[in-house]
Image (cartoon, rainbow, N blue to C red):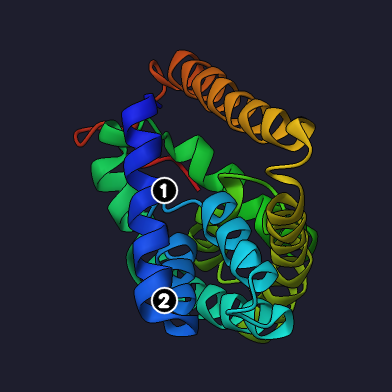
Amino acid sequence: MSEKIVVWVFQFVTHIISAGGYAGIVALVTLNSGGVPVPSEVILPFSGYLVYVGRFHFALVILAAALGCNIGSAIAYWIGARGGRPLVERYGNWVLMSRHDLDRMTWFFSRYGSIAVLLGRMLPVVQTFVAFPAGIARMPRLRFHLYTTAGALVWYSCLSWFGMKLGEKWHTDPRFQQAFHRFHLVVEIALLAAFVWFVGTHWKNRVRPNDAPAER
């Protein structure tokens, strides 16, 4: 991710939150949890900073984020449950997914869906997309939202707390600025490595429109 894209995303997020308040947090986290790559690693730390300056209340930030998370997750879950598998089987060639990937993902969520959603909500990038495969696997909705909420509360609380502490120390302790920049560097490297690995391991097995369906 280039520096210009990072700056643009940061400016977009801060503008929406500054203009919309708690509703802006709900809207941005809805996008994030619905599969749009608007990073919670920017949304919540900035919201935490606004807690530090006195504009927001910490508990209300977390509740607004949890609400947005459930709204976005419900949309992504619904898409996955209603048409996710046919969509991936038809257009899997474009996202480098095979039917074997679909079968393995469905099995995994059927067996380990609760822990996958709980931990997925606390992992960068993963938490943006975890609801879609849960919908494909048709994980029970109540359990899905309970674990979504639990994981989101932990993750968003940590990010908001980090934003508060960042606001307190930004101009007095250079270690926080260094840690912030290193965090973004690590995330970008991890994303690049994951992309290279995914393409390398899935290119030959991607779904093609004329492939015969896998035997049941």
Image point (66%, 36%), residue name: 180
Horizontal and vertical percent for residue 74?
48, 78
The quadrant the N terminus occupies is top left
Query: Is residue 124 visible to us here?
Result: yes
Residue type, label 2: Gly
Q: Earlier in the sequence, mark 2 or mark 1?
A: 1
Q: For residue 203, which numbered disc appears in the image?
A: none
Classify residue 114 by image quadrant: bottom right
Furthest residue in direction front, as rendered: 172
Image point (25%, 43%), residue name: 91
Furthest residue in direction left, as rendered: 210
Image point (20%, 37%), residue name: 209
**CA distance separating discs 2 and 1:** 14 Å
Residue type, label 1: Phe
Horizontal and vertical percent for residue 160?
70, 63
Number of numbered markers: 2
Instruction: Identify the secondary structure beneath mark 1.
Output: helix
Q: For residue 24, which numbered disc appears in the image?
A: 2
> How packed is label 2: few (under 14 Cα within 10 Å), some, or many (20 or more)?
many
Horizontal and vertical percent for residue 177?
67, 34
Residue bearing mark 1: 10
Instruction: Identify the secondary structure beneath mark 2.
Output: helix
> How packed is label 1: few (under 14 Cα within 10 Å), some, or many (20 or more)?
some
Query: Is residue 78 visible to us here?
Result: no
